[in-house]
Image (spheres, rainbow, N blue to C red):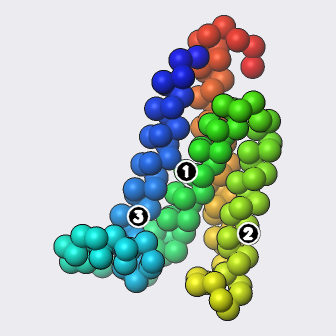
Amino acid sequence: MKQEKCITFAMLHTLIPLCMGTGIYILVRPGTYIARICISLNPWLGELRIRMGTDLFHIFLRNYACDMLWAYALTIGLFWYGRLIGQKVWKSALIGGGFAVLMESLQILPVIPGTFDGMDVVTEILAMLIAGCVSMIFYKYKDKERGEHV
């Protein structure tokens, strides 16, 4: 498999979700740390807003989409790196899932900013499963293209 295609796959499937999530934070939740940092670097970003409704789509966008995009990007990156160093897929998945659960659980503590929500963990794990499936399909196709057994 050409390494360039794998790097391109990993970069696109990591950077695009992270940029989308950052954009959502800026537009929907400007008080978050990442949005405040971006707005301090580019003050005109502070003028951008999306009026949020109370329907399910807006609730999902405001509360879960960014976490899902972050978890997706993390999983793609871990799978790519794990494959690069010859690590088993389940180890990459365990590291990603454990990190997501740890980060959410730390929000229970009063010293860590954020609000713990069990649905965040569920949606992050769902995003990680999707990223795992996308990665396995991509790498299986690339391995077949090279004539390797999967």
Name the amino acid type tagged 2.
Answer: Leu
Question: Of label 3 and label 2, which has the lower sequence position?
Answer: 3
Residue in view at x 73 percent, y 76 percent: 105
Q: Mark 1 points at which residue?
A: 73
Say the numbered circle drawn on residue 33.
Answer: none
Q: In this view, does 21 lie above or below 130?
A: below
Q: In this view, does 115 lie to the left or right of 62?
A: right
Query: Is residue 50 visible in this depiction of the protein?
Result: no
Say the numbered circle drawn on residue 102.
Answer: 2
Q: Is residue 96 left or right of residue 73?
A: right
Q: Residues within 10 Å of mark 1 (few under 14, many from 20)?
A: many
Percent position (x, y) of residue 69? Answer: 52, 57
Q: Nearer the viewer, residue 122 or 95?
A: 95
In whole angstroms, how far apart are the C-alphas of marks 3 and 2? Answer: 21 Å
Q: Quadrant of residue 54?
A: bottom left
Name the amino acid type tagged 3.
Answer: Thr
Q: Mark 3 points at which residue?
A: 22
Residue in view at x 58 percent, y 16 percent: 1
Residue in view at x 71 percent, y 87 percent: 109
Question: Of label 2 and label 1, which has the lower sequence position?
Answer: 1
